[in-house]
Image (cartoon, rainbow, N blue to C red):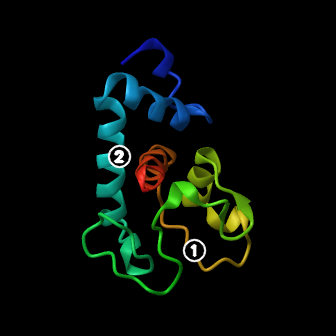
Amino acid sequence: MPTTCRIARSAPGLACLLACASAAGAPADDAVARGRDLLVQYRCGSCHTIPGVPGSRGQVVQPLTAWRHRSYIAGRLPNRPEVLQRWIVAPQSLVPGTRMPQMGVTPAEAEAMAAYLFSLE
């Protein structure tokens, strides 16, 4: 992994990770694939429809199609990788009363899940 991508665990790390994808190929591809697998593991598709995630046909809340083109998370939070990661880990801390449950996702898992969602066109 290029030196510039070693900061991938910092708040702007996902942006770096995605930038490394175009430069190096595999690291971001691995994160995206891991994110997709984690979305399956945590059964996010029970509530959301998520392109490319097997069995995700949930219609309880908004589908996650074309995620990278959205302006807001939960209609309130700026749609940026670091905010999405925090949202996935602890949604109630950002929007009290939201229907999004806290699922026990770790920060590292949330980073991979966000990488997948931001890969969606």
Relative to 56, does residue 33 appear above or below in the rendering? above
Q: Dot 2, how many residues are within 10 Å of its Cα: few (below 14), some (14-19), or many (20+)?
A: many
Tell me the element at label 2: helix
Q: Is residue 33 left or right of residue 14?
A: left
Q: Which residue is mark 1?
A: 100
Tell me the element at label 1: loop
Pick the quarter of the image with the N terminus.
top left
Amino acid type, label 2: Val
Which residue is pictured at 35% across the width and 67% down the height?
A: 51
Where is residue 30 drawn, in percent x and y?
29, 39
Relative to 88, does residue 99 appear above or below in the rendering? below
Nearer to us: label 1 or label 2: 2
Which residue is pictured at 70% across the width and 70% down the height?
A: 75
Q: Earlier in the sequence, mark 1 or mark 2?
A: 2
Quarter of image, res 46: bottom left
Which residue is pictured at 36% across the width and 51% down the height?
A: 35
Q: Is residue 21 left or right of residue 69?
A: left
- Marks 1 and 2: CB-CB under 8 Å? no
Relative to 111, does residue 19 appear above or below in the rendering? above
Relative to 103, does residue 107 appear above or below in the rendering? above
Which residue is pictured at 50% across the width and 16% down the height?
A: 4
Where is residue 104 drawn, in percent x and y?
48, 61
- Furthest residue toward left: 54
Where is residue 23 drawn, in percent x and y?
38, 22
Q: How many marks?
A: 2
- Furthest residue toward top: 3
Residue 12, which numbered label? none
Amino acid type, label 1: Met
Q: Which residue is mark 2?
A: 32
- Furthest residue toward bottom: 60
Pick the quarter of the image with the C terminus.
bottom left
